[in-house]
Image (cartoon, rainbow, N blue to C red):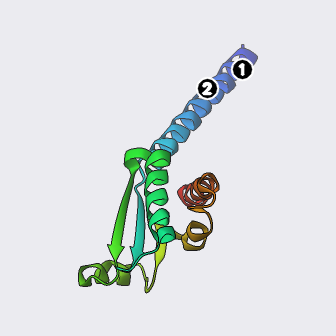
């Protein structure tokens, strides 16, 4: 009788702990799927073809990869209204930033290297770097 009760107790503990673990995992996944992802592209008024491609590809890639969880802003550093955001993010020149919560990743170099010549690679880099911020 004692063995049966002990076995039942152990079985109940296993079931409860498994259920709680599954619920916690689901909650963590749900929280990750609702985290806002903000892309910012700071540029000047005079822009080259590559600069325009970096903006277009980054905007498109964030939308494709993260859907309505992502936003994208293009900010002209020659425009005084962009100064507060540039100061907040500590930006002084052409910069492509992705911000997730309090963390940010600078993708400027990757953008200028791959946005025109290898957009598929650029998209993969964005995914890799942003997914790392979501962890």
| Residue 100 screen position, x and y as percent | 46, 62
How many residues crowd around disc 1 within 10 Å: few (fewer than 14), some, or many (20 or more)? few
Say which element carries label 2.
helix
Q: Nearer the viewer, residue 108 or 101?
A: 108
**Quadrant into which the C terminus falls:** bottom right
Task: Report the disc number at residue 88.
Answer: none
Give the left or right position of residue 124, taking residue 100 as reference: right
Q: Is residue 110 visible?
A: yes
| Residue 127 screen position, x and y as percent | 58, 53
**Quadrant into which the N terminus falls:** top right
- The correct choice, above or below, for 63 with respect to 1 in the image is below
The residue shown at (46%, 42%) is: 30
| Residue 72 screen position, x and y as percent | 37, 60
Q: Are marks 2 and 1 in contact (CB under 8 Å)?
A: no
Mark positioned earlier in the residue sequence (2 or 1): 1
For label 2, the residue is 15
Mark pair 2, 1: CA separation: 12 Å
The residue shown at (46%, 79%) is: 94
For label 1, the residue is 7
* 2 vs 1, front mark: 2
Hey, which quadrant is residue 117 in on the image?
bottom right
The residue shown at (75%, 18%) is: 3
Q: Nearer the viewer, residue 45 or 105?
A: 45
- The correct choice, above or below, for 3 with respect to 122 in the image is above
Say which element carries label 1.
helix
């Amino acid at each position: 009788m004692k063995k049966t009760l002990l076995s039942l107790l152990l079985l109940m503990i296993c079931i409860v702990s498994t259920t709680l673990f599954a619920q916690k995992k689901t909650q963590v996944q749900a929280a990750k799927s609702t985290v806002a992802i903000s892309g910012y592209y700071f540029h000047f008024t005079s822009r080259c073809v590559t600069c325009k491609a970096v903006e277009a590809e980054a905007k498109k890639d964030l939308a494709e990869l993260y859907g309505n969880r992502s936003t994208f802003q293009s900010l002209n550093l020659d425009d005084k209204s962009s100064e507060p955001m540039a100061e907040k993010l500590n930006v002084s020149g052409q910069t492509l930033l992705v911000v997730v919560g309090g963390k940010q990743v600078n993708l400027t170099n990757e953008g200028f290297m791959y946005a025109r010549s290898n957009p598929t690679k650029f998209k993969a880099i964005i995914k890799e770097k942003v997914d790392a911020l979501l962890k």
